[in-house]
Image (cartoon, helix red, strand yellow):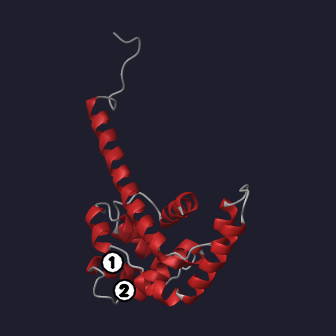
Amino acid sequence: MYPYPIPHYIGPKMGVRLLILAALGLGSLYVIHLLAQDYQKIRKPIQAAKALLNIGKRDLSAQLLEMEKENVSTTESTTTESQEATIDWAKIIKYDTLSCALSLICQLSASDDLKKDTEGETLYTFVSSNINNTDVPSKISKAFHLGEEYNKNHPYDFKKCYTEYPLCPYSAKTMLSILQYYTYYFG
């Protein structure tokens, strides 16, 4: 039927494997999407980005006045924003079957390099300030403290988090770059 023999590794099992791999990949991307939505809540708004969106508009006087009012109100309410910002950890853990969020938290607390990134620093600061909160599930605090233990041994020892959470196909750098792209395009 075919002019060449079909290799033994291609067959009906290959299609099932491909479907499983695609489903796992989409599931982990959905969890990163949920984390990115909650990340938007804890991130401070960038006023310069709003100004860039107004390039090419005819009348900027009303928009500039609105930006000045927002700038004054954001400086006055920075303490209330940090208290109001919350992440729905239960929802993230519910949909995080591959433990990508836990792996991200573990790697963030274990690595000093990842904390130098803007998104990494913001997320690490938020998690570390709220880790003693009663609303944070034990899985999140376990991942955070596990990463801190790895960091005590060596500041770049975040690869041990891969063995703790082996199902997550993404590294923390990849997940943080996805957060960065998400905030850039949807921010």
Q: Residue at x 43, y 65 (%)?
A: 37
Looking at the rendering, in which quadrant would you find the N terminus? top left
Where residue 141 appears, x then y in whole percent?
Answer: 33, 82
Pointers 2 and 1 in contact (C-beta within 8 Å) = yes
Q: Tell me the crowding category of disc 1: few under 14, some 14 to 19, or many 20 or more residues within 10 angstroms, Cα based.
A: many
Q: Of marks 2 and 1, which one's residue comes earlier in the chain? A: 2
Instruction: Give whichever of 36, 111 is nearer the camera.
Output: 36
Q: Residue 83: which quarter of the image?
A: bottom left
As helix, strand or loop, the secondary structure at mark 2 comes to loop
Q: Tell me the crowding category of disc 2: few under 14, some 14 to 19, or many 20 or more residues within 10 angstroms, Cα based.
A: some
As drawn, the label of residue 131 is: 2
Where residue 174 appears, x then y in whole percent?
Answer: 51, 61
Instruction: Give whichever of 185, 119 is nearer the camera.
Output: 185
Kind of residue sitting beneath label 1 = Ile
As drawn, the label of residue 140 is: 1
Where residue 106 appears, x then y in whole percent?
Answer: 41, 75
As helix, strand or loop, the secondary structure at mark 1 comes to helix
Does any portion of residue 102 appear in the rendered image?
yes
Kind of residue sitting beneath label 2 = Ile
Q: Residue at x 33, y 32 (%)?
A: 9
Q: Tell me: 79 left or right of 20.
A: right
Q: Residue 19: which quarter of the image?
A: top left
